[in-house]
Amino acid sequence: MAQSAGARQWAVVLSELAGVRVVVEWERPAWRVRWVDGPTRPALMDRAAALTRYRVGAPLTAQDMRFARSSSGQARALAWLTLADQASRADTVDRVEQLVEDTGYPQDRADEAGLAGAELLNRLAGGDSVDMGRLLAAASPPVPPRPWVRPTPALAGEVVSYRWPVGGPPAELLGSSPPTGPVAPSDGSVPESLRRCARCNTPLTATPGRGRPARFCGGTCRVAAHRASRRGPTDN
């Protein structure tokens, strides 16, 4: 099947671009592209769409594939450590999930102490993200936030296996892209680019001036969150 051959080619090219193992396989009703940690979903999707124009993996195109990035326990632990001072807040689980989703190559953004702390937290929690939060919330003395310490490229690898025809794609589509990901401030606060409404997850617009950053996008979400907190936790 021509698309099966294209899927194998896509798996090689995307793995080289991402610098992590990327799997492309048929899962009804679509071709699924999967990887763990590594680049963000938009970064790999955008590059695949650009390379489709040069017939990479033809006849299978980027539009035919569904991209799904998953996160390791260590990646979630790193996110929890980044937001450690917020571990007791009810909305922090969602914030951790969003942080992991938005941060490409989380292990590469952490220092050795952060990686060691994440590995310990992951083991103690048995890989369960919610248990990581409970451990941090109950820690005494409190665990200080450990923000990402360095930027990394959106895509760390380089395509080396594919034979391009004359007039192939420009070099920037074949190699790593420059660092574009957000890096948290040294004071442990969440970067403006990562702040989202604690209720509906809508990105929050930074507002000038002093004072505490907004937690909600508007009054509707603020009131809904207040009512939910008064009702207490509910089972999903």
Image: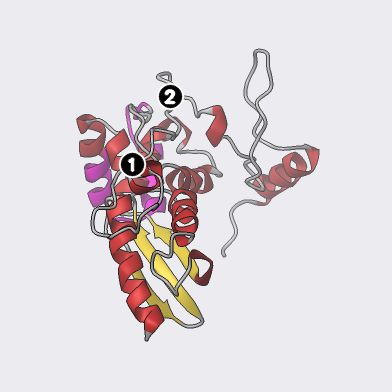
x, y percent for residue 201: 62, 46
- Return the residue at label 1: 176
Name the foreground residue: 171 vs 232: 171
Q: Looking at the image, which is closer to me, 111 or 175?
A: 175
**Position in image of residue 222 (x %, y %):** 73, 39
Residue placed most toward the observer, 125 or 161: 161
Segment colored magenta? 118-144
The residue sitting at 43% across, 35% down in the picture is 181
Q: Is residue 92 above or below residue 187?
A: below
The local secondary structure at tag 1 comes to loop
Please name the predominant secondary structure of the magenta segment in the image.
helix
Callout 1, which amino acid? Ser
Kind of residue at badge 2: Gly
Q: Quadrant of residue 152?
A: top left
**What residue is drawn where x is 29% and y is 33%?**
110
x and y percent of residue 125 in the render? 30, 52
Badge 2: residue crowd in 10 Å (few <14, some 14–19, many ≥20):
some
| Residue 213, placed above or below residue 37 | above
The mark found on residue 188 in the picture is 2
Q: CA distance from mark 1 to mark 2?
A: 28 Å
Which residue is more in the foreground, 142 or 51?
A: 51
Badge 1, how many Cα within 10 Å: few under 14, some, many 20+?
many
| Quadrant of residue 220 within the rendered picture | top right
Residue positioned 76% across, 42% down in the render = 223
Specify the quadrant that holds the C terminus. bottom right
- Circle nearer the N terminus (1, 2): 1
